[in-house]
């Protein structure tokens, strides 16, 4: 039995990755194809979405039999992509546009609520792809950019050209900063599994229970576009669903070359996939289909097509000797977008400059808390300005088709008027994330860095020249109009700029003093009280303090203490007159007072701690003493299971803990357990590090996928356990020891 159980666990976790054997990809048609899979493990539990303002998620039992998000007001009109921009058409034209509108409750049929594909697409070969743009740069509206695809202002071009136009105007870039998202993620299980299908349907239905949104989500996939489409058969079920005669994918093509968008599902449709004349044979997976949107205009069913659940993979092989076409590539793990809800930038940089060979440039910004620093403590590259704009990634080569030198092309390139625009370019970039690790209420030194040594790093390859006219940092945290701090540029008398020399690294700096609204300090929990010290004096009067428990507002006070009534993370902010609220300082409270040591003897049983992971916390430790009566593979188990968190014994005495049954997200401690001997186990998560200790000795490490901390009492035993790793609202912790004594 243990071997079967072990294989089943491995299959549940490892099989989705194993099935991701990649088919042939035609990058000439799909140059921004990315095989990377970043599973969002929170989707394995329905209703775990972090809500800003929404209500509780409805039960899964209320999920409808079909959903088509392309039919609601948040999905933009079907369009025909320009050139080979399918990746940006799917992810920006459809997904990014839809997700922002679905959150904001805005109408995607309006030009001002659509987002252009080519603002992103043209930089595909510019060392910053669509993933970097939506995370770090942002995307302006189609109205601001001048088109839903190419721009009527900045010109029609392809990503391989070296003269496409760039957007200018700080206000346009500032607008784009508000339209951002986090790193793209993927459905955790593939759509060949029942788990994966449930996860995908819940996302399509209501964003996996995230009631902040006005509708469900959508997702991106890659396919071999030379599909064989046939009509849905005439059966009573299909008549009732209203889909008779609609087209569906019988076969995909052979090579992956196109991006599509998954917008819905329909559990009512039945097919005869094996051609035996029988529709809807469930043992052959002939019931149900995904609804997919294309960017080829009114293709198939007015731009949409059905794909049977059985065909949810990227390609088919050519016919074999028996005329049969087989699956090619693993089942999809569709890509999803998490938008940054209600986002606004706090600090930005505004730059006005020109340069004659734009793909020679790398622009960067840095920051330091040391006002005398000569170089920054933290630096970011400005995506969009990473040796970009020549269609070849700023590369120089000696091959027949390589460019021998970087082209003479001004920063603004060639616009729709057909002219090269050599005037200065004005742009902005969001510094909020860069500044987040520093105390913005105190002075910070910012650096603007212009590297013109080319991507090769060889100054001799640089031939351009340019000028820096103005650069400044704008602070919007407390003044929505922005408080501007200019960099002092040493301009020569009578000149309005400083020269940017070729083949150099020039660094400019300024100090931003910020608003002096200091946060409380010295947060502490003791004797059933949460206490803190008043902020440093700054000339502003404090109105009140807000107290939070596990991130939720608990109350307000004008005192420097607050009663502790629950376990968890207690935080406090200071609210100044005028409404300015500071950052939070926190301290952790234990679940219960420590009593005398007590052991509980568990035989063929275990215990459950309900709601211990209902909230998420920063760092954490799970620890306990254990005296096993027996040791075998998979006994002494704890946690919800692989994919969320699990720990267990092995027959050789090794103790295993982590997130996945295979890979780097688990740690093994050799010789940790011995029959009828006490061992102290401690599992510690700090940021991205997970460490396993046995009797105080470090025995194993792993990558922490998720992070929390809370102390809990084991059943009625008064034993101490401290809990663990952003397991994303795991709710309960189960320990099924199968013959063990646990104590503190």
Image (tube, rainbow, N blue to C red):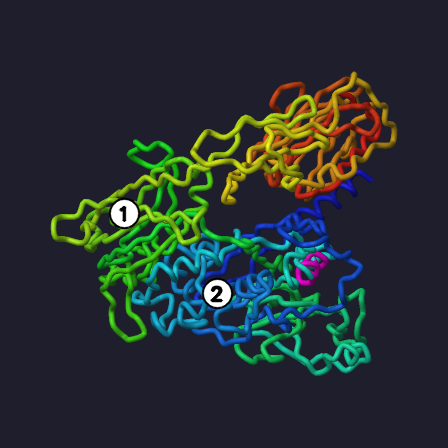
Find residue 328 and name its label: none
Q: Which residue is mark 2?
A: 88
Q: Report x, y in % for residue 730.
A: 71, 42
Considering the numbered disc 1 on the image, is that residue within a helix, a strand or a loop? strand
Q: Report x, y in % for residue 6.
A: 75, 41
Estimate the spatial distance between the alpha carbons at disc 2 and disc 1, rounded to whole Å: 29 Å
Q: Is 128 displayed left or right of 342 in the figure? A: left
Classify residue 71 by image quadrant: bottom right
Please name the residue shown 77% across and 66% down the image: 284
Whether residue 385 is visible here, answered yes or no, is yes
Q: Nearer the viewer, residue 497 or 580?
A: 580
Mark 2 or mark 1, earlier in chain: 2
Establish if 639 lies above or below 491.
above
Neighbours of disc 1 within 10 Å: few (<14), some (14-19), many (20+) = many
Q: Quadrant of the C terminus?
A: top right
Q: Nearer the viewer, residue 267 or 63?
A: 63
Main SS, magenta residues: helix
Q: Is 174 displayed left or right of 204 in the figure? A: left
Find residue 451 and name its label: 1
Classify residue 263 by image quadrant: bottom right
Neighbours of disc 2 within 10 Å: few (<14), some (14-19), many (20+) = many
Establish if 619 lies above or below 384.
above
Q: Nearer the viewer, residue 660 or 397?
A: 660
Q: Report x, y in % for residue 368.
A: 36, 36
Which portion, as a residue range, is magenta? 197-205
Establish if 665 lies above or below 85.
above
Please name the residue shown 46% across and 61% down the image: 32
């Amino acid at each position: 039995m243990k071997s079967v159980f072990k294989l089943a666990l491995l299959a549940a976790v490892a099989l989705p990755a194993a099935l991701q054997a990649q088919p042939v990809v035609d990058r000439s048609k799909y140059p921004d194809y990315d095989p990377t899979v970043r599973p969002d493990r929170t989707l394995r539990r329905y209703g775990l979405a972090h809500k800003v303002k929404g209500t509780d998620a409805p039960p899964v039992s209320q999920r409808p039999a079909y959903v088509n998000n392309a039919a609601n007001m948040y999905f933009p009109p079907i369009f025909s992509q320009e050139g080979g921009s399918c990746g940006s058409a799917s992810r920006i034209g459809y997904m990014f546009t839809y997700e922002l509108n679905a959150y904001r409750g805005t109408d995607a049929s309006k030009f001002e609520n659509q987002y252009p594909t080519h603002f992103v697409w043209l930089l595909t070969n510019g060392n910053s792809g669509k993933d970097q743009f939506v995370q770090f740069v942002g995307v302006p509206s189609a109205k601001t950019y001048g088109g839903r695809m190419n721009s009527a202002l900045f010109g029609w071009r392809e990503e391989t050209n070296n003269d496409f136009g760039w957007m200018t105007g700080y206000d346009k870039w500032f607008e784009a900063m508000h339209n951002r998202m986090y790193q793209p993620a993927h459905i955790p299980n593939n759509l060949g599994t029942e788990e994966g299908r449930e996860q995908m349907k819940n996302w399509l239905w209501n964003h996996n229970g995230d009631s902040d949104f006005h509708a469900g989500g959508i997702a991106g996939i890659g396919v071999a576009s030379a599909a064989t489409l046939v009509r849905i058969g005439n059966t009573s079920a299909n008549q009732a669903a209203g889909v008779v005669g609609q087209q569906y994918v019988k076969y995909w093509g052979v090579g992956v070359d196109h991006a599509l968008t998954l917008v819905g599902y329909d559990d009512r449709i039945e097919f005869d996939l094996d051609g035996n004349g029988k529709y809807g044979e469930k043992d052959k997976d002939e019931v149900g289909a995904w609804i997919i949107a294309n960017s080829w205009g009114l293709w198939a069913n007015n731009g949409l097509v059905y794909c049977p659940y059985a065909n949810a993979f990227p390609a088919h092989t050519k016919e074999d000797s028996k005329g049969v076409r087989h699956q090619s590539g693993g089942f999809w793990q569709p890509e999803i977008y998490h938008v940054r809800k209600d986002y606004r930038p706090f600090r930005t940089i505004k730059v006005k400059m020109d340069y004659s060979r734009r793909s020679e440039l790398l622009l960067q910004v840095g920051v330091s808390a040391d006002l005398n620093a000569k170089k920054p403590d933290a630096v970011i590259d400005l995506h969009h300005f990473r040796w970009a704009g020549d269609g070849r990634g700023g590369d120089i080569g000696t091959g027949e088709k390589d460019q021998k030198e970087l082209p003479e092309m001004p920063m603004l390139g060639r616009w729709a008027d057909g002219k090269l625009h050599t005037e200065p370019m004005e742009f902005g970039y969001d510094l909020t994330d860069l500044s987040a690790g520093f105390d913005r209420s105190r002075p910070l030194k910012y650096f603007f860095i212009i590297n013109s040594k080319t991507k090769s790093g060889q100054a001799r390859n640089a031939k351009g020249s340019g000028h820096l006219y103005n650069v400044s940092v704008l602070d919007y945290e407390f003044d929505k109009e922005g408080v501007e701090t200019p960099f002092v540029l040493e301009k020569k008398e009578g000149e309005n700029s400083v020269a940017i020399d070729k083949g150099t690294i020039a660094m400019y700096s300024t100090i931003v003093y910020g608003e002096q609204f200091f946060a409380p300090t010295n947060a502490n929990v003791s004797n059933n009280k949460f206490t803190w010290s008043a902020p440093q004096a700054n000339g502003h009067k404090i109105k009140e303090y807000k107290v939070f428990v596990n991130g939720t507002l608990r109350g307000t006070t004008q005192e420097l203490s607050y009663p502790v009534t629950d376990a968890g993370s207690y935080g406090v902010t200071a609210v100044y007159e005028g409404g300015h609220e500071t950052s939070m300082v926190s301290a952790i409270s234990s679940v219960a007072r420590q009593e005398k040591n007590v052991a509980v003897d568990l035989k063929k049983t275990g215990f459950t701690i309900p709601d211990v992971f209902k909230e998420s916390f920063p760092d954490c430790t799970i620890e306990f003493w254990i005296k096993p009566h027996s040791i075998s593979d998979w006994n002494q188990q704890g946690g919800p299971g692989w994919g969320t968190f699990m720990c267990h014994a092995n027959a050789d005495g090794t103790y295993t803990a982590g997130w996945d049954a295979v890979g780097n997200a688990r740690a093994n401690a050799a010789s940790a357990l011995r029959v009828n001997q006490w061992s102290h186990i401690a599992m510690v998560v700090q940021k991205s590090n997970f460490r396993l200790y046995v009797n105080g000795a470090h025995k194993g490490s792993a990558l922490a996928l998720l992070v929390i901390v809370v102390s809990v009492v084991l059943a009625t035993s008064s034993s101490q356990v401290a809990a663990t790793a952003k397991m994303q609202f795991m709710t309960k912790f189960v320990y099924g020891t199968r013959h063990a004594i646990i104590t503190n």
